[in-house]
Image: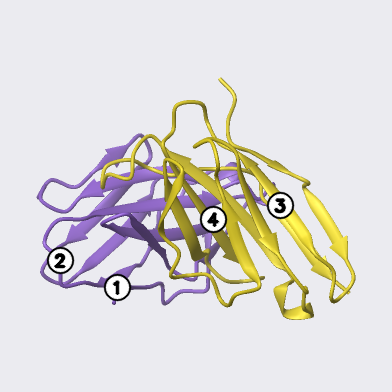
Chain colours: A yellow, B purple
């Protein structure tokens, strides 16, 4: 079956611009996670959704970052007034539930470069 | 707060040999899971193995096994009969309630 799909795979934008990153989870997965991964680092938690609501957004670094999942499936991570420090790989993952035993299934990521 | 530490930024192993990747974690919870993920150059994170904290028996998946020491909060990954396709970044992950925490990763090189 289809896995987690992230688009675009690469995004280059100028400092100060607005970007949207899209994640299409595995069908039927209720939990959806966004992570940011800098070069040589492990994934850093940003936000996770259980259904349509953000169950935990404590990882969002500041108010320029926002994410939505209006119908409980596709999610969009939005970054306003991008800065060079936002350059990273943005990973999306989904799981069947948010339970302890439910492993994450990752997409291929979106590599964001802010020039 | 939960933390996950991988103290080996890089490791190498001869093809067909065995290698062990270390991971320690810190938590005050009693019920949790631990995972190892692999991230090859293609960059997609792939689940390798999982361990339930309340199970004393170490998890095994083919050539991959773990040494889980709950009291020591240690969760190492052993790869037996290493293959060239095992070359990747390996991340240890702790999951508590609704949250996955990842270590900084170990880059594994397999030498032909």
Structural distance between the alpha carbons of marks 3 and 4? 10 Å
Vertical side of A74 occupied by B90: above or below: below
Query: Mark 3 vs mark 2: same chain?
Result: no
Circle nearer the viewer, 4 or 1: 4
Q: Disc count in the image?
A: 4
Structural distance between the alpha carbons of marks 1 and 2? 9 Å
Circle nearer the viewer, 1 or 3: 3
What residue is pinned by disc 3? A21
Where disc 3 sits, the SS reads strand
Does residue A80 appear left or right of residue B28 in this picture?
A: right
Where disc 4 sits, the SS reads strand
Residue at the image point whose x is 28% and y is 52% from the top: B66
What residue is pinned by disc 4? A34
Q: Quadrant of residue A61?
A: bottom right
Question: Few, some or many C-alpha atoms within 10 Å of disc 1 (few <14, some 14-19, many ≥20)?
Answer: some
What residue is pinned by disc 2? B29
Asked if disc 1 and disc 2 are in contact, CB closer than 8 Å, the reply is: yes
What residue is pinned by disc 1? B2
Q: Point out residue B44 in the picture as x, y percentages from the top left corner.
A: 61, 46
Q: Point out residue B98 in the picture as x, y percentages from the top left corner.
A: 32, 54
Circle nearer the viewer, 2 or 4: 4
Asked if disc 3 and disc 4 are in contact, CB closer than 8 Å, the reply is: no
- Of label 3 and label 4, which has the lower sequence position? 3
Query: Mark 4 vs mark 1: same chain?
Result: no
Where disc 1 sits, the SS reads loop
Q: Point out residue A2 in the picture as x, y percentages from the top left corner.
A: 59, 24
Structural distance between the alpha carbons of marks 3 and 2? 34 Å
Question: Few, some or many C-alpha atoms within 10 Å of disc 4 (few <14, some 14-19, many ≥20)?
Answer: many
Q: Is residue B15 visible?
A: no
Chain of the residue where label 1 is placed in the rendered structure? B
Question: Few, some or many C-alpha atoms within 10 Å of disc 2 (few <14, some 14-19, many ≥20)?
Answer: few
Q: Point out residue B108 in the picture as x, y percentages from the top left corner.
A: 55, 60
């Amino acid at each position: 079956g289809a896995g987690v799909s992230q688009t675009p795979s690469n995004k280059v934008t100028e400092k100060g611009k607005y970007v949207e990153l899209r994640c299409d989870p595995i069908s039927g997965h209720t939990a959806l996670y966004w992570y940011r991964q800098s070069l040589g680092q492990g994934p850093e938690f940003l936000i996770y959704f259980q259904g349509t609501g953000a169950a935990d957004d404590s990882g969002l670094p500041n108010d320029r970052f926002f994410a939505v999942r209006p119908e409980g499936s596709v999610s969009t991570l939005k970054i306003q007034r991008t800065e060079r420090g936002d350059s990273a790989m943005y990973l999306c993952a989904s799981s069947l539930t948010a339970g302890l035993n439910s492993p994450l299934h990752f997409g291929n990521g979106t590599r964001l470069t802010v020039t | 707060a939960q933390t996950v530490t991988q103290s080996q930024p890089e490791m190498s192993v001869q093809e067909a040999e065995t290698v062990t990747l270390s991971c320690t974690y810190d938590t005050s919870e009693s019920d949790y899971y631990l995972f190892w993920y692999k991230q090859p150059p293609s960059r997609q994170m792939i689940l390798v193995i999982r361990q339930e904290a309340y199970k004393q028996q170490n998890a095994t998946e083919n050539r991959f096994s773990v040494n889980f020491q709950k009291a020591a909060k240690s969760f190492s990954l052993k790869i037996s009969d290493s293959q060239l396709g095992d070359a990747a970044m390996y991340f240890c992950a702790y999951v508590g309630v609704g949250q996955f925490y990842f270590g900084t990763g170990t880059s594994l090189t397999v030498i032909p």
